[in-house]
Image: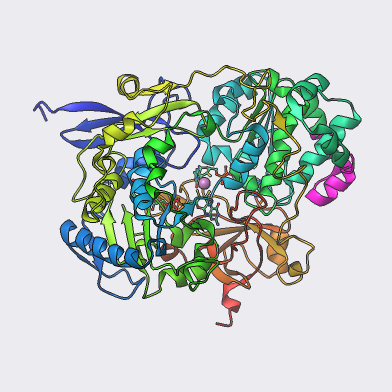
Amino acid sequence: MNEATAVTTVRAACPHDCPDTCAIRVTVQDGRAIKVQGHPDHPPTHGALCTKVSRYPERTYSADRVLHPLKRVGPKGSGQFARVSWDAALSDIASRLRAIAARDPQAIVPYSYAGTMGLLQGESMDRRFFHKLGASLLDRTICASAGGEALAATYGGKIGMHVENFAHSKLIIIWGSNSIASNLHFWTFAQAAKRNGAKLICIDPRKTETADKCHQHIAILPGTDGALALGLMHELIMNDWLDHDYIEQYTEGWPKLRERALQWTPERTAETCGISADEVRGLARDYATAKPAAIRLNYGMQRVRGGGNAVRLVAILPCLVGAWRDRAGGMLLSASGWFPVDRAALQRPDLMAGRQCRTINMSTIGDDLLREASPEFGPKIEALVVYNSNPVAVAPESPKVVKGFSRDDLFTVVLEQFMTDTADHADYVLPATTQLEHLDVHTSYGHSYALINEPAIAPLGEARPNTAVFRELAQRMGFDEPCFRDSDEAMARVAFSRDVSFDALRESHWVKLPLPDAPLAQGQFRTPSGKCIIDSPLFGVPDHVPNYEAPGSELAGRYPLAMISPPARNFLNSSFVNVQSLRDIEGEPVLEMHEADARARGIADGQQVRVFNDRGEYVCKAVHSKRARPGVVNGLGIWWRKLGARGTNVNEVTHQRLTDIGRAPSFYDCLVEVRPAAAAAT
Ligand SMILES: Nc1nc2c(c(=O)[nH]1)N[C@H]1C(S)=C(S)[C@@H](COP(=O)(O)OP(=O)(O)OC[C@H]3O[C@@H](n4cnc5c(=O)[nH]c(N)nc54)[C@H](O)[C@@H]3O)O[C@H]1N2
Ligand SMILES: Nc1nc2c(c(=O)[nH]1)N[C@H]1C(S)=C(S)[C@@H](COP(=O)(O)OP(=O)(O)OC[C@H]3O[C@@H](n4cnc5c(=O)[nH]c(N)nc54)[C@H](O)[C@@H]3O)O[C@H]1N2
Ligand SMILES: [Mo]
């Protein structure tokens, strides 16, 4: 142990799909990453990492890593593969894709999401490749497009408060967010505000660990947030708690919405939301009288049919009371629109060369894989290239997704770090590097700092970055534009059009965007008029849109329980489910039920149950839980199917109908029935 060992510290960024995008210091000893730590000087990270990411070395060095290219040798989904060389794999993939492209390149579909949020490994060389090929485009809607497009329709972009400024708020409404689980670094600022006397209110059908720590929890029914916002507006109008000057100067279209809000008495609102009229009145009074008041909205509340309208209604609230005048007032759903990312330079849509490629919505991949060619749809999907995503586990209505991925006439390539449910269905699995093994640059949707991620260690086994794989494939397809030879560093240098230089990132690890402290204090929304748009030319005046599968509907006669499926704290979507120490904490897939709902069905605490509707059924453990309100069950996600009971997960019962705005899935708009599994007649 006396021998001198080379210890270095490398500048990294957390790549995961989370608002926090932490600055990380990686300690490397003799070429091995031995520790990851949150950087103490990066204000949003303030030296802390979440439980999951502090296990990043365990994930990286896991014995389960895919480290060599694999070719399928058994039936699809069986997980039987044989090791092949990169050269053999890439040659065969290129020739298969070339043959399909000769008929119609749109029969080839890329499928990716935010397994890494890095601009290079997430959305650079891959996009160039598919643009040049003329493949189908992918509408990346699975998470945030309802809220994102709604916010853009209202504010002109995905813009919001600086997360640090929540520390100075006097009221924080945490709306559709389990911050302690999914936005931990915001929670630190909320706690600082609490210590300074701020009131914290949580609006969530589930009594989450975050709700436990707030002063008040308002347990609304899923999909009724738009109604609640309208009810609050009613009270703001009736009590004249409006900032008339802000409304006059910086908003457009309020008179029409004012008329609509006047229909939403506290009693009507309470009835719709499944809460009391006093809760509506009290919330309105708190919101109007505490200054500055801030809202932390998260994407949890927009995974329902009316998610887009609901986000628009909530986003209008801070304008009505002039909360934006203060740096610690306003709202944060996403801050990603502040970043000057040069997507044209990274992704080169010009390589489509005027071709009108069709678009496939990732959220309806179940249906679309099962569609035949038609004039409306275009060619049947013949090939899928999946990276940064695990659709077989995370896409809605998995019975159809699995059926589609099991098609023998579908050619599927999956770039992965692990043998996920999706990788099991591949023809080729190509080993991908982790964040410790590649270069990247990052924006954030929860703070306003750009970051660099330097590679800390050499790629393990034969793993390659996504960029390298698409660079190689481009060469084998004969794409000879110089952009297909760009190095990762060359792409990182063009990733931002201004304000953030690659050299500055290298030098200082992160760069704070030059934004005003209270960015919307004098309007300056990113809309053409600079005002907040209430009456949108595209979407009209926002309204409450009830769920597709609403309690009280005809369907509710057969399936009376509303199911939401929010993330389990120790997983990140379906990532980390395979990390043993984290799976040990989560135990097994769980359905939280209110005791009365469970007892009415003869379900004991801890009993195995079937959760089902017309689409399918999954099996898990029911727990009698104070976290569930009557009539609503919480199926915590997102387990790998093969690690859950009977090879299923919660998406067995979700559906593919899309949101009002943004063409997104409505995961939390889902009626089910629950029965003891023992009673299953199967
Ligand atoms: N630990 C952990 N962190 C994560 C993730 C994870 O899986 N695990 N996921 C990441 C991702 S992909 C994202 S998009 C972000 C945000 O991810 P989100 O999906 O927004 O996750 P949460 O912040 O947990 O917010 C969901 C909350 O909304 C509540 N909710 C469900 N339906 C409704 C409704 O109709 N109205 C209201 N008001 N609330 C509702 C749920 O009960 C839950 O507590 O978090 C990221 N961070
Ligand atoms: N029922 C239900 N379903 C949901 C949700 C829900 O709340 N309820 N949440 C939805 C939401 S918000 C989202 S964002 C989606 C998330 O869905 P996905 O974007 O599919 O996210 P993950 O499940 O985390 O899968 C990401 C995969 O990318 C891989 N990966 C990570 N880094 C790299 C890399 O550098 N290269 C390659 N090739 N692969 C990499 C990881 O190993 C992992 O398997 O799920 C959605 N599905
Ligand atoms: Mo997400």
Q: Where is residue 462 in the image (x, y as percent from the top left)?
A: 19, 51
The answer to whether residue 437 is left or right of residue 350 is left
Q: Quadrant of residue 69?
A: bottom left
Q: Position of residue 675 (x, y in %)?
A: 63, 71
Whether 264 is among the magenta residues is yes
Whether 340 is among the magenta residues is no
Image point (48%, 29%), residue name: 339
Quarter of the picture holding the C terminus: bottom right
Q: Pick the residue in front: 387 or 108.
A: 108
Q: Is residue 646 visible?
A: no
Residue bounds of the magenta highlight: 262-283
User: Is 473 rendered above or below residue 198?
Assistant: below
Q: Pick the residue in front: 129 or 307.
A: 129
Q: Position of residue 201 (x, y in %)?
A: 70, 34
Outermost residue to the front: 354
Image point (25%, 60%), residue name: 94
Quarter of the picture holding the N terminus: top left
Q: Pick the residue in front: 257 or 279.
A: 257
The answer to whether residue 67 is left or right of residue 13 is left
Q: Quadrant of ligand 1?
A: top right
Q: Is residue 623 visible?
A: yes
Q: Position of residue 420 (x, y in %)?
A: 37, 59
Q: Quadrant of residue 498?
A: top left
Image point (60%, 27%), residue name: 190
Specify the color scheme. rainbow
Chief SS of the magenta region:
helix
User: Is 377 rendered above or below residue 630?
Assistant: below
User: Is 331 rendered above or below residue 389?
Assistant: above
